[in-house]
Amino acid sequence: MQRKKCSKCDSALTKARIQSSPGTVDVNKTPSSVLNNNYDYSELIPYVCSSCGYVDFYVEEPGKFV
C-alpha cells in the first residue's frame, strides 16, 4: 500500500477514525472497521497530518466505485 502524503505540507498522513457525540465530532488515531454487505459500500477513512493538522478523506476500497 502506498503511503499517503499531506497535500498541504507533503508530510506523511496517519490513518485515523471518526467518533461523534452530541455536539462534537472527534478523530481517533485507532482505526476500526464497519461491516456492511452492500457491494457499493466502502468505509470512509480520515487521514491526519501530524505536522500541520490537515485531514484528508479516502475510501478504503476505491475499486468498488469503478
Image: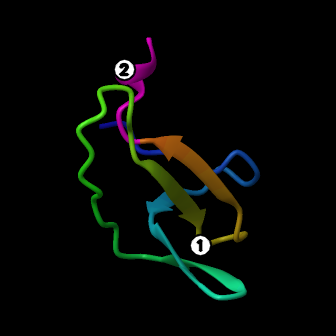
Q: Which residues are magenta?
A: 60-66
Neighbour class for label 1 at 10 Å: few (<14), some, many (≥20)?
few
Q: Quadrant of the N terminus?
A: top left
What amino acid is labelled 1 in the image?
Ser
Residue closer to the observer: 49 or 57: 57
Q: Residue at x 45, y 67 (%)?
A: 16
- Give residue 49's position: percent from left, percent from top: 61, 64
Residue closer to the observer: 49 or 26: 26
Residue 36 image-quadrant placement: top left
Q: Residue at x 30, y 33 (%)?
A: 38
- Give residue 32's position: percent from left, percent from top: 30, 66
Which residue is the extreme one toward the bottom? 22
Q: Which residue is mark 2?
A: 63
The answer for how far apart the CA atoms under marks 2 and 1 are is 28 Å
- Give residue 3's position: percent from left, percent from top: 41, 44
Q: Is residue 37 above or below residue 28?
A: above
Q: Quadrant of the C terminus?
A: top left
Neighbour class for label 2 at 10 Å: few (<14), some, many (≥20)?
few
What amino acid is labelled 2 in the image?
Gly
Is the C-beta separation of discs 2 and 1 under 8 Å? no
Q: Residue at x 47, y 53 (%)?
A: 45
Tag 2 secondary structure: helix
12 to the left or right of 33:
right
39 to the left or right of 44:
left
30 falls in the magenta region: no
Q: Earlier in the sequence, mark 2 or mark 1?
A: 1
Q: How many marks?
A: 2
Residue 62 seen in the figure: yes
Q: Which residue is mark 1?
A: 50
